[in-house]
Amino acid sequence: MRREDAMIVGPAKKLGKRRLFMFGALAVSAALTLAACGSSSPSSSSGSATAKPSGSATSGSITWWASPITTTSPDPRAVLISAFEKAYPKIHVHLQSAPTDTDTNRASLITTISGGSASPDVFMGDVIWPAQFGAHQLAVPLSKYLPSSYWSKFATGLVNGATYKGQVYGAPFFEDQGFLYYRKDLLAKEHMTVPKTWQQLETDAVALKNKGLVKYGYVWQGASYEGLTCNFMEYLGSAGGSVLNPGMTKATLDSAAGQKALTFMRSLITSGASPKAVTTFQEPQAMSTFAEGQAAFLRNWDYGYSYANTASSPSKVVGKVGVAPLPGFAGQPYPGTSNIGGWNLYINPHSKNQAADLTFIKWMTSPAAQTILATKFSEIPTVQSVRSSAAVIKVNPVLATVPHTRLIPRPAQTPQYAKVSQAIFQNVNSVLAGSTSPSSALSTAASSINSAVSGSGL
């Protein structure tokens, strides 16, 4: 999401976290990039990686299907391809630019791959695709070819999010996550510290608003769309809850943790910490409200910092914005919980040279390529050693915050994720609007989710 244009159903399908977010007037070329979140490694059976791929690992040609990563020049895709071909001069990569709308992108790939086409060989896809593509043989189980030592280099949570039924289908390429943005000047004026708990955030947001320092205390994404699923996951994760059981066969969100998360989200509105209009806010509305100086706190993806602090943008708070991990609930051991967004690299099962495809993927997820993405294009790297590099962290304060977050995936390990997400955001939005009680909404959502995960199909 910054870019997680991750929605697959309904009219509000364009989140814009990356994926691309359609910012309209908010579009800042440096920020409008694709992002619709040691790591857990694949199961021991897949960790052996004994399968032998077809083709040559050092020669041949590859067609790479990838959406634009940024709107800046030079094109990050071209820069990466050039560096790869210098490292592997006998492998030629042809870039096939994919649609920026994730739904269109996904539909095109499904039609192409299910029809048996061997091209594209490698494709860049949303982090919520592994279950859908894996369940319908639209992507290669990479963990059959790449050992556990390869997967262990990624940041915690990324591999788990790319796993379906014990096999890893996507190699984490670049990542996105939610952060707390705050007005440094206002906190300093009122001698406030950066909130580390949700309760403190609510209290401080109300205080700053009531003193007339800002119109709104805290803004976020509360509209009935995929972005609300992301926000809910962060509160639910902070409370120690989950949406589905480990087998992805039964809803678990109708729980004490779910009640805590949803009750608190509603209280943000009833207490006055967040405006009633937050129930209609997507990323652009929340971002513009904060950048215009109307809010003290903002939850948004990693582009939020550069947008708010870019003089060429419409921002009125340049130099006044700080960034921190999202808070946690007081007394709960889950501070800094953030939803995973971003993009993975997948291989077409019909590709004729999967050995070269694997070489390409391994290089694109190497420290060299990840450093290029992080330092030249401000993408959050997926490799832990790059994320913690002092040289990389120096580039952007957001990157300095990344190591302090706890990543959790959306419940996308089911092929029915679209229906699961819809059940979440529709019912959560109903609670935020005051139309439904948290207990009733959780019960309804759980029932819809149980019906969805018992189904099949794309």
Image (cartoon, rainbow, N blue to C red):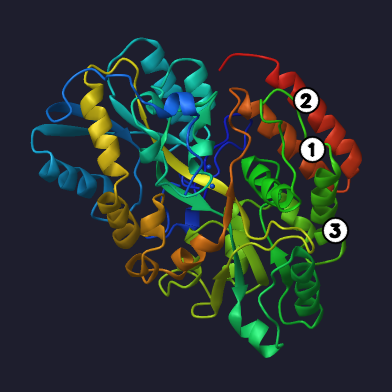
Which residue is at a point 82% across and 78% down the rendered structure image?
A: 210
Label 2, residues with CA under 10 Å away: few <14, some 14-19, many ≥20: some
The x, y position of residue 425, in whole percent, is: 72, 39
The reply to whether discs 1 and 3 touch (Cβ–Cβ < 8 Å) is no
Q: Which residue is mark 2?
A: 448
Cα distance, mark 2 to mark 1? Answer: 10 Å
The x, y position of residue 318, in whole percent, is: 49, 77
Note whether 387 is above or below 397 in the view shown. Answer: above
Amino acid type of the residue tagged 2 in the rendering: Ser
Q: Which residue is mark 3?
A: 267
Does 331 sit left or right of 317 as displayed?
right
Say whether disc 1 or disc 3 marks the residue closer to the N-terminus: 3
Residue 19 in sight: no
- Element type at mark 1: helix
The reply to whether discs 2 and 1 touch (Cβ–Cβ < 8 Å) is yes
- Element type at mark 2: helix
Q: Nearer the viewer, residue 393 or 42?
A: 42
Amino acid type of the residue tagged 1 in the rendering: Asn
Does 90 sit left or right of 249 as displayed?
left
Note whether 312 is above or below 234 in the view shown. Answer: below
The x, y position of residue 358, in whole percent, is: 27, 30
The label number, if any, that marks residue 427 in the structure image: 1
Say whether disc 2 or disc 1 marks the residue closer to the N-terminus: 1
Cα distance, mark 2 to mark 3? Answer: 25 Å
The answer to which image quadrant residue 272 occupies is bottom right
- Element type at mark 3: helix
Mark in the foreground, 2 or 1? 2
